[in-house]
Image: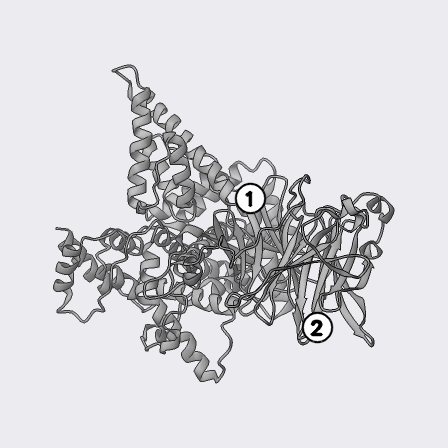
Amino acid sequence: GGFSYEDSGKLLSDLVTELQMQSIFTDIGKLNLNEPAHSYVLPFVQGTPATAPSTSAAWISHQGEAVFTLASPSGGITVVTLPAHDQDGTVSILELKQSSMMQRLAGWMPTAIRGDQSISDLAISLAVHQLEDDTFIFALCQDHKLRMWSFKHQMCLLVTDMLDYMPAGRGEVKASPAQAHKLRLFFSSSTGLCLAIYLAVPKGSQFCVLQLVASENNRYSLDHISTQFTTQETLVDFVLTASDIWAVWLDNDNQTVVKYISFEHSTAGMWNQVFVQPSPEEEVHVGEDQDPREVYLDVLFSPLRFTASAIIKALQIYKRGTERYSDLSWEELKKEVTVTVENELQGSVTEYEFCQEDYRLLQVEFWSKFYACCLQYQDVLSTPLALHISPATAMVCVLKKGFVSFLLPCFAVDHLYLSSDEYLFSEEETPIAEDSNLSRDVLQLIQCLRMVSESLPEDMAYEMDKALEDLLSPEKVSEKVLEGLLANDNENVIQDILNKLQDISNPTVAINTLLRELDLEADAETESRPTVRISLSQLYGSSVAASLICQAVCQTAMTRTLLCRDLLILQQLYLRIGDNVSGAQLLQLQQDLIPRCSSLLCSYHLLKQMSLTLSSSVPLDILNADLQHLSVLELSDSTIPTSMLNPQTVVELFYQNVARKAIMSQIFSQQDVEGSQGMLHWPQMISSVLTLLCQFLWPSNPSFLFPECLMVNCQYAPLQEYARLVGPWCQVNVGSYRFVLGHCYLASG
């Protein structure tokens, strides 16, 4: 099965230089890259079409020179060397030819004109590997052959026919030139140089992993390590690491697909899933009692759905103008959208009198037209361009047209719930339980939860969600939903679930294990606020880091809200049917497991709501007056966030002002205790940060830092909503909630 990831998108235009921090691009920004010292234009022979190289690779030499290898459109490789940026020198252009010679060229002469090279060795993918005294240039060519050149010795050292690694159908593939093969390298001191070659063939593409082996007298060969097959559609990019192949594709519906596989230890060639952030829904449902404008604005300006760039593009098209909106805050952009759509609507009204229903339909028509425009641009901005993995931290990013997606490790329980059946069936054991029988029971239980989820009609799912919002008892509503499912079970789904439940040997222990895994109740130690050492004071402190960590909180909360909902319905089914469980187990369900599950459902719903709630900007005079009122109390003061073209939620506000320092202190004080100063390894580090942030937000933990932060930053509406949602069921910090609510009423008048 393996480890799954989920992605968190982030706007590129929001990669704003943080205050007091200089960008790594500061010096480059001062240069004019068109000046002769920083660029070079390849001379073309007159009378020949100016064709761009089909692919390229570049590196900085040990002497500081910039070296570019370019695949000549008519075969062969041209190497352009620019002098080091702080030295004078001339640009040299050399060509690697099959005759194993390098020749100085006066111009970019198409080799086909000279008649000494066939088009078969046109490079379609290039990669370079630097040694201490040489550089190897690898070229994967149109004739399906891999060639390795020595830059220093001006020789082709190795030619390998990649079709030798294909199990079948070589003749058919050989007949047509390669168009989409790709080549990637990975080097480490332990493995040496490894190559991954993607062979794009019509009836089943494959990745070959090979290891470069050197013998005496500069002779080289390739050892075959592994072949991995794939049925995915259009490969965009892939990366080779020490143990895995990561790849990003576009499927037939133009959706991004990211997967990875261990090339040495994969069982049955099963690729691991990455759960990508879903696209915004294509249609917005407007209830009869709802205002269309408010519903559409809520969806458009809710975090996690649309980037500012997509809304701005749609606004420009809708207004048919060339106005620029880059200086608008998120709130100002919302006002601009409202005014634009409403003006368009008013301009189309020719009659003076309208019945309310007709006007409402007209509103829906105009807002849905604008929404469709936003969807279209969001779709374009989401197009994947490349995959990047940081060798130092193992952080995986997908670069898209309009933003970057960061991949975060998926927690074990979420991984099992989100995995599709084909992946779930391949799980031999689950990291949730060590005992193999219990492990099997938990897997069966999660398969039943997925069946509940798939059988739940949209209106019943909405009913459960609304019940949480209206503070109704989740137990009673889940009972009602189950009755609805039983009454409308035309396809015998409930019977299928019951049959599956028979396979669970000890259901109450499996349910208890799952509930324990979902509960974020922590020790009282999370209350402590030790100081962070200077070197870590900025770690994960940027607006980008805050945004993606808080998006991850939201995604985790959304997934687990659904999981707890399905588990609650399933437990009601156990109570209703009751076979395969003893009387003692039914009592345990009724008195312990169901109430605990209900409480977890409310807690995750609260986390979800808070991570979707935008913070409001507060005028400085009100903020100062409020801080004076609080000065008699020993509460930490805080700074109000500046409004940017990036929605800041109240969870982001809390993370940046309070939680991040406390989290870092906790992580590194634990490391000090263990005596290990481990590298800042992204998968482990981000999982720890995420878990601790969720614990700080968890209502039944003794820490009261989140409501306190909201109060100090005058976020009265979100604070009142938070207190309303926890009121009926949370027995922790009751006095504190009364105090902050009293302060809200006092400050709000």
Along the line of sight, the residue nearer the viewer: 13 or 201 = 13
Q: Amino acid at mark 1?
A: Glu
Residue under label 2: 192
Horizontal arrangement in the rendering, residue 595 relative to residue 98 (left or right): left
Q: Tell me the residue at 68%/53% (across/down).
A: 106
Horizontal arrangement in the rendering, residue 115 relative to residue 538 (left or right): right
Question: Does dot 1 land on a helix, a strand or a loop?
Answer: helix
Residue 329 image offset from top left, x and y in percent: 30, 47
Residue 266 location, quadrant: bottom right
- Marks 1/2 in contact by CB < 8 Å: the verdict is no
Residue 708 image offset from top left, x and y in percent: 25, 63
Q: Amino acid at mark 2?
A: Gly
Q: Tell me the residue at 36%/77% (across/down).
A: 534
Density class for disc 1 (Cα within 10 Å; few <14, some 14-19, many ≥20) is few
Q: Which mark is residue 646?
A: none
Horizontal arrangement in the rendering, residue 74 relative to residue 247 (left or right): right
Horizontal arrangement in the rendering, residue 138 relative to residue 636 (left or right): right
Question: Does dot 2 land on a helix, a strand or a loop?
Answer: strand
Along the line of sight, the residue nearer the viewer: 695 or 653 = 653
Residue under label 1: 454
Answer whether residue 147 is visible to the viewer in this image.
yes
Answer whether residue 265 is visible to the viewer in this image.
no
Residue 157 image offset from top left, x and y in percent: 79, 65
Density class for disc 2 (Cα within 10 Å; few <14, some 14-19, many ≥20) is few
Residue 614 image offset from top left, x and y in percent: 32, 50
